[in-house]
Image (cartoon, rainbow, N blue to C red):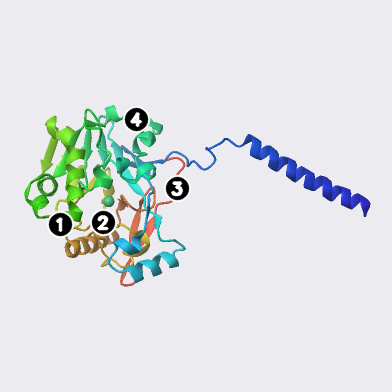
Amino acid sequence: MRRACLLTVAALCGILNSAELGAANAPKGRILEQSPGYYRLRVGDYKITILSDGTPPRELSKIMSDPDKVRASLEASHETDPTPFSINAFLVDTGSLRILIDTGAGPLFGTRSGHLIANLRAAGYTPEEVDAILLTHIHGDHSGGLSSAGKPVFPKALLYVDRREADHWLGAAAAANAPPEQRGAFEQSRRAVAPYQQAGRIRTFNGATGLFPGIRSVPEYGHTPGHSGYLVERQGQRLLVWGDIVHSAEVQFAEPTVTITFDVDPRAAAATRKTILNAAARQGYMVGGAHLPFPGIGHVRVDGGGYAWVPAPYQANP
Ligand SMILES: [Zn+2]
């Protein structure tokens, strides 16, 4: 009995000691840092690196068109509201060119965004090595990483965007007619793009266009007037980097009619979502989403009257 008690006390002391030691040795402030947010993938002979810009929490029931459905879908997925909102960008390395699709939000969400450059460097690239930037659209969570303090973050890159997108956000007409709460978005767009504009480095394209070998734009108008996906196709493999076709995997695969307040034309956005989801499911190509949980790559399948998200399995040796 006495021996058992001693053993118990000794065991407890051991636990206490190791706990104390653990606290003393824990690297202060580092214990909850995430691993670098990049993920590799191949599309034929092209190397893709997906970059996380962050996961700012967003209260989706306040910004989507059917709050009850949003709450129920999040709850059924064991998610809370606000929920982490992935912001992903895609670097395509063709061997001779490095092409970045979207640039993240920069400082738009404080310390919860703007991690793209750190993750780009962790992945072995520098901003100076980026030859071209393809914007899916000019919203702040895609263009906010373009510039910092009036200087281009990617000093050698040409900037490609659908001309409808440039006309809407950079032209005078839409901004003049915008309600006051939307004026900030126009100002943000101009600030982000200005250093590239001043340097004559903006290239607009008109709808479906082959931009680089194996890379073409896919019109996905609705969320914004020139919202575009980019299809990477090499050696029989296809990846559609689709931008903002889906803002919430938990909600919009099953219910593609649910829209978000940032849709410039919600009806067109929902129709485009259905068209693209249907094409992806029927044709079976891989998709990459700006706001699907990082790394945001996978397939779409038909599920009842809607669709379901099938995340790609993790690959340690891509
Ligand atoms: Zn977005």
The part of the image, by quadrant, that contains residue 193 is top left
SS of the residue at dot 3?
A: loop
Residue 142's quadrant in the figure? top left
Q: Residue 179 carries which label?
A: 1
Badge 2 density bin: few <14, some 14–19, many ≥20, Cα 10 Å: many
Q: Nearer the viewer, mark 3 or mark 2?
A: 2
Q: In which quarter of the image is residue 69?
A: bottom left
Q: Mark 2 points at which residue?
A: 245
Q: Does the residue labelled 2 lie within 8 Å of ligand 1?
A: no
- Cα separation, mark 3 vs mark 2, equals 23 Å
Q: Disc 1 versus disc 3: distance between alpha carbons?
A: 44 Å
Evaluate if marks 1 and 2 touch, with contact meaning CB atoms under 8 Å apart. Answer: no
Which residue corresponds to mark 3? 314
Q: What residue type is labelled 4?
A: Tyr
Measure the C-alpha gap from mark 3 to mark 4: 22 Å
**Depth check: 99 or 117 in front?**
117
Q: What element carries label 2?
A: loop
Q: In which quarter of the image is the C terminus?
A: top left
Going from N to C along the chain, the mark reached first, 1 or 3, is: 1
Q: What element carries label 1?
A: loop
Whether pointer 4 and pointer 2 mark residues with C-beta atoms closer than 8 Å, the reply is: no
Amino acid beneath label 1 = Pro
Residue 220 shows in this picture? no
Establish if 43 lies above or below 275: above
What is the x, y in percent for residue 77? 44, 64
Residue denoted by label 4 = 125
